[in-house]
Amino acid sequence: MQTIITKPFADQNPGTSGLRKKVKVFEMPHYAENFIQSIFDSTGKIEGKRLIVGGDGRFLNRQIIQKVLKIAAANGFGDAMVGRGGILSTPAASHLIRKYRAHGGIILSASHNPGGSDGDFGIKYNIANGAPAPEKITQDIYACSQKISHYRIADTDDVDLDHLGKQMIGDMKIKIVDPVHDYANLMEELFDFEAIRRAITGGFRFRFDAMHAVTGPYAHEIFEQRLGFPAGTVVKGQPLPDFGHQHPDPNLVHVKELYDLLMADDGPDFGAASDGDGDRNLIIGKGIFITPSDSLAILAANAHLIKEYQAGIAGVARSMPTSTAVDRVAAKHKFFLYETPTGWKFFSNLLDAGIVTLCGEESFGTGSDHVLEKDGLWAILMWLNILAVSGKNALDIVRQHWREYGRNYYSRHDYEEVDARAARKMMEDLHARLGSLPGMEIGSLKIEKADDFAYHDPVDYSVSSNQGIRILFKDGARIVFRLSGTGTQGATVRVYMERYEADPDLQEQDTQKALEKLITIADEIAHLKLLLNRRKPTMIT
Ligand code: VG1
Ligand code: CO
């Protein structure tokens, strides 16, 4: 066991979901070691305790896992459970932490960010209940990283990550486990696999795109082996360090092939994809893309069809920028509804306290209290289960939902990798004008309220301020502006727009067309294009 002298790196402040930087940054001597030691310095007594370790298979995954294990051993952990090949999806890691009563888990992933040697890497820490470290802990980790003077590490050979079984580093036991087994069992407990099998026998066809990211092995086991979908249902099923040169962000741009397939006359009935670390889900029904905000609302409205949620759900939570479609379901069914800042860590307290059962974000994240992370395959199985037991197709379910609750047209425009100072200035300017906006009339729209969102956690009473600027219109339309906390280059400005349409005859318009007015107003209010020096957004979802 060695003690290595080191100096702080100024930029080790975790963002929306862990510390994300370019691979080149993580390759700097001591960079990863400092951060890992800072995690262990700020998460309470660890002697003799258990740590769960795994990642999404991206470039550097194996090397950093070796460092985590050697530093964990030198810091006194009793044992570590590691996914074979260094693989664990984020929800599977969360499940293992809970099931095996670990002290916490380290997940190596930059999630939906690109991989490969020129791409991004990330380190996330989850606490004993399986949830992402709350802000209080991420702030402590950052504080530790800013005064670190040494780290402890075992000077030993690398662990063999590829064979199941036990090994030792000093006094710390290491168990290499099947990354899929326990998670697949959990899914089988939650959902009616028999009903889905019957639908398959009846001709139901499905396509899942694993994007060469972590869900491949899980999807092969769950969809093809256990449910009996034919081989070939799962495509791009092998995790690759560079995700096959593709961006593991499941949106309509990056899985265009899947989208086109689902829009074809002879295409499958249902399509889905997940991201780098398996916590996001993209849902496409035959002939219709289902926005994550609508998906959350529809799952909440239909949860009673699922064995696990039959008894009713306690409540639902959505991140502030997520559309208010689920609010209408909550109001009708009398669920509690919570509005939290962006990032899954804000849901965990609500889930853990049992006051909400389902949560979701507009960014393709949905989950329940079965693990305290968002969970891509869970959301897809929830849809498959609802389709199987209702006997309806996805398009009809969505249309009926809109008829019953109204439709929330919704879109997010991202301005990626803009000059960080320009982005800050844009937000500051807007912030300074917030007081003057209410009452302003723009065409037929009137601004009712404008503020910077602050969240008061009802469980631990913590307050999180400056979580995004909201412009709320009298008719329920909204525009939200915020800066991304997961990018690694410059700044990314996200603009979210939403408007409600109750009239069934007006519910089948093109989304961008339906939001045209709000898109123009967003630019007029924030001077986006001028201040960010961009003619149009980089990405529209
Ligand atoms: C983005 C999304 C947010 C999500 C986060 C982590 O954060 O907007 O909803 O929780 O990514 O998702 P930001 O700060 O860039 O807007 V994942 O799947 O990349 O861990
Ligand atoms: Co993710």
Image (spheres, helix red, strand yellow):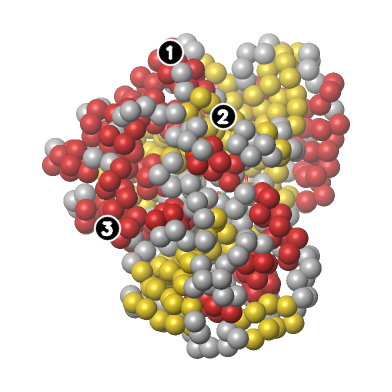
Of the 4 image quadrants, the one containing the N terminus is: bottom right
Ranked by sequence position, the earlier of labels 2 and 3 is 3
Q: Position of residue 461 (x, y in %)?
A: 67, 36
Within 8 Å: ligand 1 and the Cβ of disc 1? no
Q: Which residue is mark 3?
A: 221
Q: 142 or 491: which is nearer to us?
A: 142
Quadrant occupied by the C terminus: top right
Categorize mark 2 by other alpha carbons within 10 Å: few (<14), some (14-19), many (20+). Answer: many
In this rendering, is residue 103 above or below 321?
Answer: below
Q: CA distance from mark 2 to mark 3?
A: 35 Å
Q: In the image, which is nearer the foreground, mark 2 or mark 1?
A: 2
Residue 317: image location, x then y, percent = 53, 32
Question: Which residue lies under the disc numbered 1?
Answer: 504
Viewer-side residue, 48 vs 363: 48
- Residue at image position (44%, 77%) is 173
Give me the residue at 49% from left, 13% from top. Answer: 502
Relative placement, left or right, of 224 versus 158 is left
Question: Mark 2 sits on what residue?
Answer: 338
Q: Position of residue 7 (x, y in %)?
A: 78, 75
What is the three-letter code of the residue carrying label 2?
Tyr
Q: Is residue 110 left or right of residue 271?
A: right
Furthest residue toward left: 201
The relative height of residue 464 versus residue 115 in the rendered view (above or below) is above
Is 96 displayed left or right of 221 in the figure?
Answer: right
**Tag 2–tag 3 contact (CB < 8 Å):** no
Q: Name the front one of labels 2 and 3.
A: 2
Mark 2 CB in 8 Å range of ligand 1?
no
Q: Secondary structure at mark 1?
A: helix
